Image: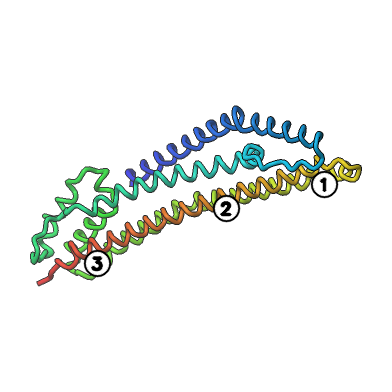
Amino acid sequence: ARGPMRKNNREFLIELFALLAITIVVHAIYTAVIRPRAAADLAVQQAAMVQDQSYVAPRSFWIVMKDWEQEACVILAAWAIVVMVMRVQGTRRSRRLLERDYLHLPEGLRVLPEDSREYLRQVESLPPVERDQLLPRSLHTALERFGATRSVQDASAAARNVCQMENERLDSELSMIRFVAWAIPAIGFIGTVRGIGDSLQQAHKAIEGDVSGVTAGLGVAFNSTLIALVLSIVVMFFMHQLQLLQERLVLDTENYVDDRLLRRLHVR
């Protein structure tokens, strides 16, 4: 239990450091690039409107991205993608183990309960990092249960339980990413409410003919919602791809154990 606990603690610290680093980098980009360029574009557009009342300002990427809600959404989306990339790398490392033959069983050879100890030693001799992966754990559990109970059915059930528990663990680890996928549009809606509120505060100026305050507030509202929904779609897409990879890993591990071990087990 200490091995998985240390692994989880290490992953938590890495993810926390990644969030801190992404926050610093994104805020620096906003401070040095995005907000100055947005301010420059706004100044140009306002000057053009003063000279030409029929002037229609083009949509500026910098203005769309400039507000605090968009910055928060970008930070969360970038962090979620980095975490998912790390999970994908871990899944691929586990998947590469499916290409190996751990038991070296010749075709047609039957494994008896008294033979299980010999094959258990092969799995137990693996490096700890590799032994903690799904496939070696499934093989170890099936062999151990077969040797103890002399039942092929019990060995099969034990291996499937390991795979099922791993599938549930991988699914539970996606809970934070699911929260981020929900939080991003929620932050966008906060920007919508803030922008509409700012517009209502400037309504008296619009009656007098100055609609710049109202349009600026509505711009905040619509821009924050737009960016939040786009980033939410991107995060959800990557999350479903990761979930698909993890589910395929579990299913392929079950097939590996069935084909390479369980069908070779035999009780006299």
In this picture, residue 200 sits left or right of residue 118: right
How crowded pointer 1 is (Cα within 10 Å; few <14, some 14-19, many 20+) is rated as: some
Q: Position of residue 167 (x, y in %)?
A: 37, 58
Q: Mark 1 is on which residue type?
A: Leu
- Tell me if 4 is positioned left or right of 111 in this view: right
Is residue 227 or residue 151 the one in the foreground? 227
The three-letter code of the residue at mark 2 reads Trp
Spatial CA span between label 2 and label 3 = 39 Å
Q: Amino acid at mark 3?
A: Ser
Residue 155: x and y, percent?
Answer: 23, 65
How many neighbours does mark 2 have within 10 angstroms: few (below 14), some (14-19), or many (20 or more)?
some
Q: Quadrant of the C terminus?
A: bottom left
Name the front one of labels 2 and 1: 1
| CA neighbours of label 3 inside 10 A, class few (<14), some (14 to 19), many (20+) | many
SS category of the residue bearing label 2:
helix
Residue 137 coordinates in the image, percent (x, y): 26, 54
Residue visible at 43% across and 37% down in the picture? 14
Viewer-nearest of discs 3 and 1: 1
CA–CA distance between discs 2 and 1?
28 Å
Q: Which residue is mark 3?
A: 156
Q: Earlier in the sequence, mark 2 or mark 1?
A: 2
Query: Measured from the top left, where is residue 240 in percent x and y?
Result: 45, 56
Vertical arrangement, residue 40 with respect to residue 215, above or below: above
**Residue at the extreme right:** 208
- Distance between mark 3 and mark 1 Cα atoms: 66 Å
Residue receiving disc 1: 200
Q: State the residue lying farthest toward the top.
A: 32
Q: Quadrant of residue 56?
A: top right
Please state which of residues 226 and 147 is positioned toward the viewer in this rendering.
Answer: 226
